[in-house]
Image (tube, rainbow, N blue to C red):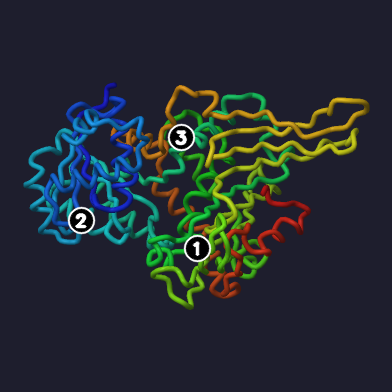
Amino acid sequence: MNTPPCDMLVLGGTGDLSLHKLLPALYHLHREGRLPGDMRIHTAALDSLSRDAYLALAERNCRAQVARSEFDNDTWQGFAARIDYFSMDLSQSADFNRLGKWLGDGCQRGRVYYLATAPDLFEPIAEHLHNAGLAGPHTRIVLEKPIGHSLESAREINRSIGRVFEESQVFRIDHYLGKETVQNLMALRFANALFEPVWRAGHIDHVQITVSETLGVENRGAYYDHTGAMRDMLQNHLLQLLCLVAMEAPVHFDAESVRNEKVKILQALKPISGLDVQDKTVRGQYSAGHIGGQEVPAYYFEKNVDNDSDTETFVAVQAEIDNWRWAGVPFYLRTGKRMARKCSEIVIQFKPVPHRLFDGSQANRLLIRLQPEERISLQLMGKSPGKGMRLTPMELDLNLAQVFPQKRRWDAYERLLLDVIEGDSTLFMRRDEVEAAWAWVDPILSGWDSYYPNSRPYPAGSNGPEQAQSLLELAGREWHD
């Protein structure tokens, strides 16, 4: 491994993201020998903790997140030797001067700043890093979504970050792009001649992209109540998946070529604005219901949520891409909390054969499941055993866990953190990509304010509001549930 010398500073080191995702992912990378040998992992947060106290906190959380068979004391001790902790107020410029003295002269060997913080701290942190002389040419900065809450706020964040860091130094992370099956989607499309001739409007009836959760807002009520499902999930995760399904083959598999093609798709999305939001979108909010046999409260009774809140916890959108490959093919995007099942999947529904020779024949369907299991299956029609031509759906099933049983499945953050360390931005969002997504989402949010003010209720444990079913039923289609 030829990874250049590099240290990482996690700002917000006592938060859930750091303790539940970043540190366990870095532990796995250390365990597999993927981190540079002398790499240091500095963490910083407001909590007044000694290094020993922080290491105890980190170990407790890593043990909870890492499989017991993959956690051993010797490996942990080696990993813990990399970690240090610095107590500081991330909003105060003077504390970054203290931080600089504590870090010493390390910028020449490379440093990654991971902002595991609230988005409203992105801009001041970048400025404080610059003023303290900590943002040199050998540094990189990682930003978690959401990047803003509108097109204008996203532009302001990008402008502020851009005043301190070159675009090549900025890594805007969407952990969905680190999932193995998401990357397999590109291999499926661009490495198999079987699919390219039919991956277009002439053969595909429609595409569904679903990201559903059984959980509610948990301890994120204060954040979520000012964000909603559109900004929290659809503007980033679902649009990224749409881009990978719909993009043209890049000239090369490198960061700029891949991201150029994704931007073209976002720019080709037909606008949805004004009264169109009533026909092309559905917004909902979960009411009381049952999940796994347990009764759960309505959204507006969740912790830190306003009792009269109308924030959407569900959104479905019928999107269309105005280009040669996809003209006339609807893309149905759907995400929600407190749904009947936890699932992230992409469904490519092909058109039926031109002439149905046999009774019971159904159109082929390609299912790409991202979670809970990672699998790709193609539904074909075949003959049932016995007399006559009775057809039945059959599946060609590729289960990645069965194909590679000896290999541990990498968490998305492991792959993306290693990409940051190695300076590979292929799976990260570029500035114009983020802004193009907001340019499409903003008119929908404005249309909701004027023409769709009330979220439709749906019982917790269901598949969303009835109106979401109508979105497809009016065209003779149905959700893959």
x, y (%) of residue 163? 25, 52
| Label whose residue precedes the other's in the sequence (2 or 3) | 2
Residue 166 circle label: none
Query: Residue at horizontal 31%, vertical 26%?
Result: 32
Is residue 470 toward the left or the right of residue 179 in the image? right
Q: Which residue is mark 1?
A: 442
Q: Residues within 10 Å of mark 3 (few under 14, many from 20)?
A: some
The vertical placement of 172 against 443, above or below, is above
**Front-most of residues 166 and 18:** 18
Q: Residues within 10 Å of mark 1 (few under 14, many from 20)?
A: many
| Label whose residue precedes the other's in the sequence (1 or 2) | 2
x, y (%) of residue 219? 38, 61
Q: Amino acid at mark 3?
A: Ser
x, y (%) of residue 108? 14, 35
Q: Residues within 10 Å of mark 2 (few under 14, many from 20)?
A: some
Q: Amino acid at mark 1?
A: Asp
Secondary structure, mark 1, is helix
Query: Residue at horizontal 59%, vertical 59%?
Result: 461
Residue occupying the far bottom of the picture = 308
Residue 257 circle label: 3
Q: Rounded to the nearest whole Å, what is the CA distance between mark 2 and mark 3?
A: 30 Å
Q: Amino acid at mark 2?
A: Glu
